[in-house]
Image: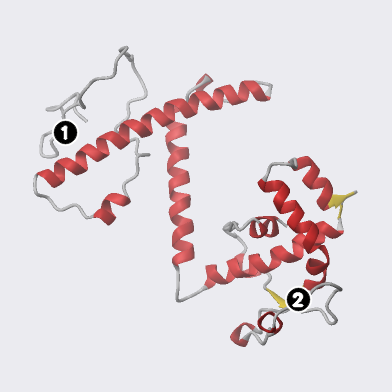
């Protein structure tokens, strides 16, 4: 169902699966006859065989449910885009008394198509770009989480507030410090790249694009801190990579 909601909004839901070999693959077969008011072009009607995927495409999507509920599915998509529907209202549209409504069943069937395409991209032995993109995004997210765990701002990083407003205040405090660290790292990374290029050392654009401002090995989260009313006009001197430890204390 989640795959269906993402797909109709023109987003791609790309989760990882711990049980990838056990996932089901679905094929789409047109209903015969078509529901009233549904007309397909010749290209849309030409759904042939699945070639080498025939052995795994054992399950069939109920396209009739999608076609019947398609106008209401588009209304749901429009309501989500314009923020006219709340999450609790959406859940009531998709299920009632523990059972999916016809609209919920339609989104489930529609999501099976998007899920199958995602699974095929994951297991493609030739093109591994999908897995590389997912791993890169997961690396960025985990780097952000590691930085947040190191800072642990606000009651030692423990959510102790009983109410949502208090929890949001704690998370906002962590986000403020984390964003300040990202800004600091970004400025110095840019200065380092410009310094290397100015000294004649080659720095490829594709290598610079992979630099992350979420590094935190150089951060000292303990001690006393002094804040001035005005930020310094210039950055601190960059650390000499050839200097021995302790020779350039105070430099980045």
- Compare residues 10 and 236 and report the one nearer the observer: 10
In the rendered structure, which disc, 2 or 1, sits on the residue that comes first in sequence? 2
Horizontal side, residue 194 vs residue 16: left or right: left
Q: Position of residue 30 (x, y in %)?
A: 77, 79
Q: Residue at x 33, y 15 (%)?
A: 225
Asked if residue 227 shows in the view, the reply is: yes
For label 1, the crowd category at 10 Å Cα-Cα, with few meaning under 14, some 14 to 19 and many 20 or more, is some
In terms of image quadrants, where is residue 58? bottom right
205 relative to 106 in the view: left or right: left
Tag in front: 2 or 1: 2
Q: Position of residue 133 (x, y in %)?
A: 45, 59
Q: Is 159 drawn above or below residue 205 in the view shown?
A: above
**Is the N terminus in the top left, top right, bottom left or bottom right quadrant?**
bottom right
Q: Position of residue 109 (x, y in %)?
A: 75, 66
What residue does disc 2 label?
Answer: 60
Say if 106 sits above or below 195 in the image.
Answer: below
Q: How is the image coloured?
A: secondary structure
Placement of 30 over or under 228, stated as above or below: below
Residue furthest right in the image? 97
Q: Which mark is drawn over residue 46?
A: none
Q: Residue at x 21, y 37 (%)?
A: 191
* CA distance for labels 2 and 1: 62 Å
In the picture of the structure, the residue carrying the numbered disc 1 is: 239
The front one of 163 and 7 is 7
Q: Residues within 10 Å of mark 2 (few under 14, many from 20)?
A: some
């Amino acid at each position: 169902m989640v795959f269906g909601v993402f797909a109709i909004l023109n987003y791609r839901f790309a989760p990882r699966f711990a049980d990838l070999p056990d996932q089901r693959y679905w094929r789409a077969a047109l209903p015969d006859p078509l529901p009233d008011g549904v007309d397909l072009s010749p290209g849309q009607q030409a759904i042939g065989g699945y070639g080498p995927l025939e052995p795994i495409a054992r399950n069939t999507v109920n396209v009739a449910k999608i076609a019947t509920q398609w106008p209401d599915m588009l209304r749901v998509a429009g309501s989500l885009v314009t923020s006219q529907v709340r999450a609790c209202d959406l859940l009531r549209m998709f299920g009632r008394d523990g059972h999916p409504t016809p609209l919920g069943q339609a989104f489930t069937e529609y999501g099976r198509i998007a899920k199958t395409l995602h699974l095929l991209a994951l297991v493609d032995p030739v093109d591994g770009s999908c897995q590389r993109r997912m791993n890169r995004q997961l690396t960025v997210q985990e780097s952000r989480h590691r930085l947040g765990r190191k800072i642990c701002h606000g009651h030692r990083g423990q959510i102790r507030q009983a109410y949502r407003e208090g929890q949001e205040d704690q998370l906002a405090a962590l986000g403020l410090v984390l964003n300040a660290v990202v800004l600091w790292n970004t400025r110095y990374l840019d200065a380092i790249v410009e310094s290397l290029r100015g000294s004649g050392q080659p720095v490829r654009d594709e290598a610079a694009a992979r630099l992350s401002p979420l590094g935190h090995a150089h951060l000292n989260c303990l001690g006393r801190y002094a804040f001035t009313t005005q930020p310094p006009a210039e950055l601190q001197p960059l650390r000499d990579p050839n200097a021995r430890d302790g020779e350039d204390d105070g430099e980045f």
